Image: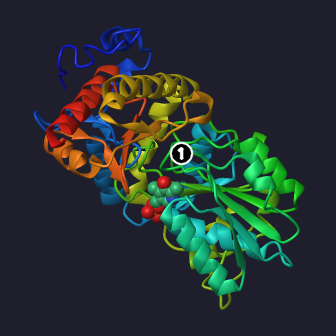
Amino acid sequence: MTYPASPSAGVSLPVPAAELDAADPLARFRSRFLEPEDGQVVAYLDGNSLGRPLAETAGRMGEFIGGEWGNRLIRSWDESWMDEPIRLGDRLGDVVLGAGPGQALVADSTSVMLYKLLRAALDGRPGRDEIVVDRDNFPTDRFLVEGIAAERGASIRWIDADPKAGVRPGDVAAVVGRRTAVVLLSHVAYRSGYLADAPAITALVHDAGALMLWDLCHSAGSVPLHLDQWGVDLAVGCTYKYLNGGPGAPAFGYVRAGLQAELQQPLWGWMGAHDPFGMSEQYRPADGLRRFLTGTPPILAMQPLKHMVELIAEAGMDAVREKSVLLTERAIALADGLLAPLGVGLASPRDPARRGSHITIEHPRFREVTAALWERGVIPDFRPPYGLRIGLSPLSTSFAELDAGMAAVRDALLEVS
Ligand SMILES: *Cc1c(COP(=O)(O)O)cnc(C)c1O
């Protein structure tokens, strides 16, 4: 991909993009991603919705199909696949989640995993009938809470947080109490990019005797996580966003070791049973983490994720975070310089310590602007009513790409205005 020479001319940025790219310790990882064909992509700013494929993935998928599948056939279940959900979960736990072994597993979709863990949490706190969630959480999260509340006769305690920021510890402290069974929040808000204070919120949820379930869809692979250290009970997340697992790649779930024996999830399938091949008459859950499985694990769909987790291990999550902060700082500086004069506002936190790896900017014409941008290979995404999200995947995005994308937003906005 090539970029216009100085798309940000006229804006006072302390350092030119080329200098930042030259000094970027992660720059070498960009070539590990599949290069789009000429003319397809000018700037990809939506890795927070669908991460780019790794270049090695096509070849390694071929090897997998010929080898483990084609040669070993059904024998691969015994040889490796049965353990894959937890083996890959362990690796993900080590590299990305800050979780010791035996607590993370890869299975289902995020929505299904969320249903299982949320219901397990509610059922695991008998005598408590409230689920706490915020009104600006991602739709599937809110809908699942509504469905479970209807199914179990529970109540929903809604948090109304500032949509340009997110849920703060004080917002949670104000609503949790003796009726609270479980609190569900997104660690990084899908709209504003607000990064919640996970350790503080988890601690005060525990003080109320409730369980904490974090949705990590927008933080896994972009923000260092320390689930064990933070005392998190439960977590779920996507693997197709910053973990580049590919469209519809399975979700991950995390269940704290000390909680596993006491919780039971509601989708009783043979893969979560005590002895899957015993073909027993009645369901008895497996000991430990396996009880959170339901059906046959999506082995084929886990393969690209395995490659990406190893890439992240090479780069290191702290380095990923450092670059992420530089990218979002620059995106905000470009928004202030190029777009604010055209009436564009920032709908994300200015404090990098409270921000994930995307920002949202707002303008009434952004729906049309997004359509025009997609046509010319500049790819952010649009979130109603007026939000343009600029997602910055630190391992695959360059500073020059960001500059080119933001200049294109300005040009498109000038054209529609
Ligand atoms: C992307 C995302 C999801 C997606 O759920 P799926 O079941 O994979 O469609 C759920 N929650 C949040 C917060 C997300 O950002």
Q: Nearer the viewer, residue 328 or 369?
A: 369
Residue 111, position as x, y percentages in the image? 51, 67
Give the residue drawn at x 32%, y 30%. Answer: 339
Quarter occupied by the C terminus:
top left
Query: How many neighbours does mark 1 have within 10 angstroms: few (below 14), some (14-19), or many (20 or more)?
Result: some
Residue 384 in percent (x, y) is at: 37, 57
In which quadrant will I find the N terminus? Answer: top left
Q: Give the camera-side residue of 389 and 128.
A: 389
Q: Check disc 1 and give the amino acid type.
A: Lys
Give the x, y percent position of residue 205.
81, 55
Q: How is the structure coloured here? A: rainbow
Q: Residue furthest bottom?
A: 281
Relative to 389, is 177 above or below?
below
**x, y percent for residue 233:** 75, 56
What kind of element bears circle 1? loop
The residue at 51%/26% (across/down) is: 325
Q: In the rendered view, does 19 fall on the left or right side of 140?
A: left
Q: Is residue 182 above or below residue 333?
A: below
In the figure, 355 relative to 257: above or below?
Answer: above
Q: Nearer the viewer, residue 379 or 32?
A: 379
User: At 54% across and 28% down in the image, what residue appears?
Assistant: 321
Residue 82 falls left or right of residue 101 = left
The residue beneath circle 1 is 164
Note whether residue 274 is visible: yes
**Would residue 34 be visible to someone looking at this image?**
no
